[in-house]
Image (spheres, grey):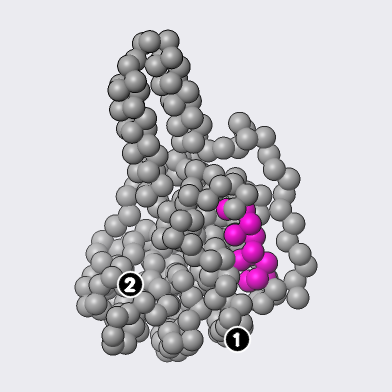
Amino acid sequence: MSSPIIPLPASRPLQHLVAAHRIFLALQSANWGAVALGLLSWREGGIVLILNLLAMIGLVLCPRCRLLGPNVAQLPAEAAATGAVALTFDDGPDPAVTPHVLDILDRYGARASFFCVGERALRHPELIHEILRRGHTIENHSHRHAAGFAGFGAAALLADILAAQQALSDIGGRAPRYFRAPMGFRSPLLAEALRRLDLTHVAWTRRGYDRLLRDPRRIVRRLTRNLAVGDILLLHDSDGRIGGAPVVLEALPLLLEQLAAQGLHAIALPDGLAEAAAEPIQQPHWHR
């Protein structure tokens, strides 16, 4: 069993809350100050509040931008130089899907990173062991995969991520290095929780929408359209189907064949992504 994970001490909020959250609070303070001074009417103040909230929601729904804190959406140059793309799977482990995904990866000599849900890992520890035995990596995808994760307060965010970190560390014998928010929705408070747990947030360059689309070829087209070295690809190794076999099991071989045809190969997330996340903030990008 791994040693307990002890969060770093909390930092001073005004130093470490991300810029977007500080701006939101400052604008709201100025807005209601203007209302109190009679510079704006209550109606005008309400409109500003709504617009401000919509802007914040827009940032939460932007999985690849860095305005909510360090965020990796592409591999560093040294990994890309080898012709690599990163293959990642979310929401497992799932006994109906994960073993078949592992068999397909073995067949094509591919490696991947599995962003696992803590509660599911505790129910199926043998799958965590098998993922690691076959040369892949285990990363943190929260403990409960709660639909309202992005709305958690600071303490609840930290507790949920820490619970998953401890569960995955205890089962696998190694602490995950990377975190991905459920559905990619990030709270403005998430960056501080990840800093305290020494985790780097990883988004994606492109996703297949394999939990929504039923046509495996359409999924592969989404993943490979304008595909470039260094891209991070997102699929799921959980059974979210409504009838029939999980579509990822049909899409994955097609994807790996397409990668080989383009002279690319799939890898797990490498070390060094923390440095990539620390690069200067770029213009926000909406997911493809």
Marks 2 and 1, how far apart at CA? 24 Å
Residue positioned most to the right: 3
Q: Report the residue at 59% width, 59% height from top.
A: 160
Q: Nearer the viewer, residue 41 or 277?
A: 41
Q: Main secondary structure of the magenta part?
A: helix
Q: Which amino acid does label 2 sit on?
A: Arg
How packed is label 2: few (under 14 Cα within 10 Å), some, or many (20 or more)? some
Q: Report if residue 182 is visible in the image.
A: yes
- Of residues 274 and 131, which is closer to you in this image? 131
Looking at the image, is 232 positioned above or below residue 8?
below
Q: Residue at x 30, y 68 (%)?
A: 209
Side (left or right) of 225 relative to 113:
left
Q: Mark 1 points at which residue?
A: 126
Q: Quadrant of residue 282?
A: top left
Q: Which amino acid does label 1 sit on?
A: Glu
Question: In the drawing, what numbered circle is on residue 211?
Answer: 2
Q: What element carries label 1?
A: helix
Question: What segment carries the magenta color?
Answer: 157-169
Q: Residue 48 colored magenta? A: no
x and y percentages locating residue 217 in the rendered image: 22, 77
Q: Where is residue 185 drawn, in percent x and y?
A: 42, 54
Secondary structure at badge 2 equals loop
At 62% from the left edge and 49% from the top edge, which residue is drawn? 155
**Disc 2, disc 1: CB below 8 Å?**
no
x 34%, y 27%: residue = 46
